[in-house]
Structures are given as structure tokens and as C-alpha cells.
Amino acid sequence: MGSLAAPRVALAETLRSGQAFRWRESAGWFHGVLGRTAVKVRQEGDRIVYAVSNEAVGAPELARYFALDLDLERVLRSIDVDLQIHRAIAATPGLRVLRQDPWETLGSFILASFNNIRRIEGMIERVCRAYGDPVAMNGMPIYGFPPPERLARASERALRALGLGYRAPYLRATARLVANGRLPLPQLEAVGYEEARRALLGCDGVGQKVADCVALFGCGKTEAFPIDVWMARALRYYFRHRRISYGAAREYARRHFGPYAGYAQQYLYHYVRGRRSATWS
DNA sequence: CGCCAGGTGCTGA
DNA sequence: TCAGCACATGGC
């Protein structure tokens, strides 16, 4: 058991904000897996208390995962540029953008397309149980996200049997691309947003939105601004009835919010989704 | 039951 | 470049 300083973090909202799909809440703890390590976390005021199944994950790894090195106050000041985002920040001031494993993020968001979060969680859970490595903590079995080599060898039929639907061949094809080294995922953190985005767009089942999600949540590109149906609703605040292409909206957002547009995106997403039946005329 | 979900790929203008 | 369409599945 350990703990680390996490000033003004909103742990539960962050883990439930649709960027990670594997955290489960039970008896006051959030249980998850980082690599081959089972992890449970809980917020106590300005600290994150944690326990791990092995020493591969400790305070440095968790600080990185939760982006605790980032000065959130400064980031929020930089994106707080209009009334809508101001309200979104005020609603959940400790929301954070996680730094997740690029492969798990890529595979997960391929499954997430044109889907709902509840079902996404179930699909990923079944993929992990079928192909992932088991890790255990307190006798509770948890399975890690399968390495690309494992999914590259899975048959489309077997993946479909897990309820992945038409996304099964996409996941398999992209796993092959990564396993063959033709998509150098670990290198994408070091290149610029545009280059990372271009590389990701070469994957089967990856369009603009998924590429932006992976760039933001898995490659550290804080300027990435993924636009799903909820974000399209939030963007009506800026565009009203005007029809606007994905690319034009994304570029507007990057100019409007700056280098941390991705944080603005996460705040707006969480805010709009929380008011799902609100009147945005 | 019908509608919706953190969209993508393909086609035809 | 862009609109229109099919696509699996299950939650609500």
C-alpha cells in the first residue's frame, strides 16, 4: 500500500470519463491493470492511495499514468476561454487526461467506434479474458490487455464470437500491423501530433476520431481534439447550425483552446454527457 | 419495440 | 472533397 500527492484530482470522474474502459469500482476501490500489474486506487482528499500486485508499478508509474507532473491549474487557465468550457471546468475541476498504453488505447478505441461505453467495456473485458495474461491481487483474477502478437494470431471467427461484430477484422488487422512493426507505436510519443495522427490513420478501423483519441489518450498529444457525437453537440455552441467538417472543427478547436485542446475536449465531453437531456436547442 | 452509441469504409457525384 | 449508405450488437 502506498500513496502519492494528487492535488485537486477527481479520481472517480477521471476513471469513468470514457477514456479508459477497464476500471471497476468495488468497495470504495477502483480495480484495474497496468501492463502486467493489477492495481487498485482510491482517493483520500488530495492523495491517491494505491496497492499493486507486484513492484513493476509504483509511485512513478502511477504519477505518469495520472499525469500528476502536469500543472493542471495552469492547463485549466489556458483553456478557460469561453462560457461553455468555463462551466465544464467548474463542474468537474479535477478531471484529468490519462497517459495510457498506446497499444491498449488503439485496440480499445477501434472497438469503441459507433458503440456505447457499457458495451465497449464488456467487449474489451471478454477480449482480455480470452487472450490476455492473468494477473491476480487478493485472489481476484484480472486479465491484462492482450499483446498485439496474441490478437494477430486470433481468428476473425473467434473474435466475432466475443461479440465484437464487424470490428473483429479491424482489430485483427491492426494487431498484425503493430506486431509486424509496421506501425511503430512506442515511437509516436516522440513525434509531433500531425505525424502521429497520419501514422494511426493507416490502421484498419481507424478514422479521424479514433486516431485523435489514440493520439490524445495513448501518445501524449494534448492538442488532439477527438470529435464524437457528444462533442459534436458541444461544438454547436460555437457553430450553431453551420455545417462544418471534422477537420475544420478540429482546427478551430486547436486555435481556440491552444496546445491543451485535448483537455478542453475531455472537460466538454464529460460535461455535455452529464447533461444528456439538457436543452441545447 | 425503435433509437442510440467516444465512426469507419466504400461508393458515386 | 463530401454526402449517403451499410455495418453488428446490446443497452435503454
Image (cartoon, coloured by chain):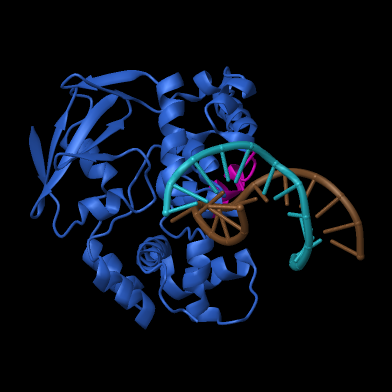
Chain colours: A blue, B brown, C cyan
Quarter location, residue A269:
bottom left
Q: Where does residue A243 sit, x and y in percent of width and height?
A: 65, 76
Count all numbered tags in the image, as a single digit.
Answer: 0
* Residue lying at 50% horizontally and 70% vertically, measured from the top left: A233
- Quarter in which the N terminus of chain A is drawn: top left
> Is residue A219 visible in this depiction of the protein?
no
Q: Relative to A123, is A160 on the left or the right?
A: right
Quarter location, residue A71:
bottom left
Q: Relative to A170, is A13 on the left or the right?
A: left
- The front one of A277 and A24 is A277
Q: Where does residue A36 sit, x and y in percent of width and height?
A: 31, 23
Q: In the figure, A119 relative to A146: above or below? A: below
**In the image, which residues are magenta?**
A194-207
- The front one of A50 and A29 is A29
Asked whether residue A214 is drawn in magenta, I would say: no
Q: Where does residue A171 sit, x and y in percent of width and height?
A: 58, 32
Q: In the figure, A64 relative to A93: above or below? A: above
* Residue lying at 44% horizontally and 28% vertically, measured from the top left: A126
* Residue lying at 53% horizontally and 62% vertically, measured from the top left: A229
> Is residue A61 visible in this depiction of the protein?
yes
- The front one of A162 and B9 is A162
Q: In the figure, A73 relative to A110: above or below? A: below
* Residue lying at 23% horizontally and 25% vertically, measured from the top left: A56
Q: Relative to A149, is A64 on the left or the right?
A: left
Q: In the figure, A210 relative to A145: above or below? A: below
Q: Where does residue C5 sit, x and y in percent of width and height?
A: 78, 55
Asked whether residue A198 is drawn in magenta, I would say: yes
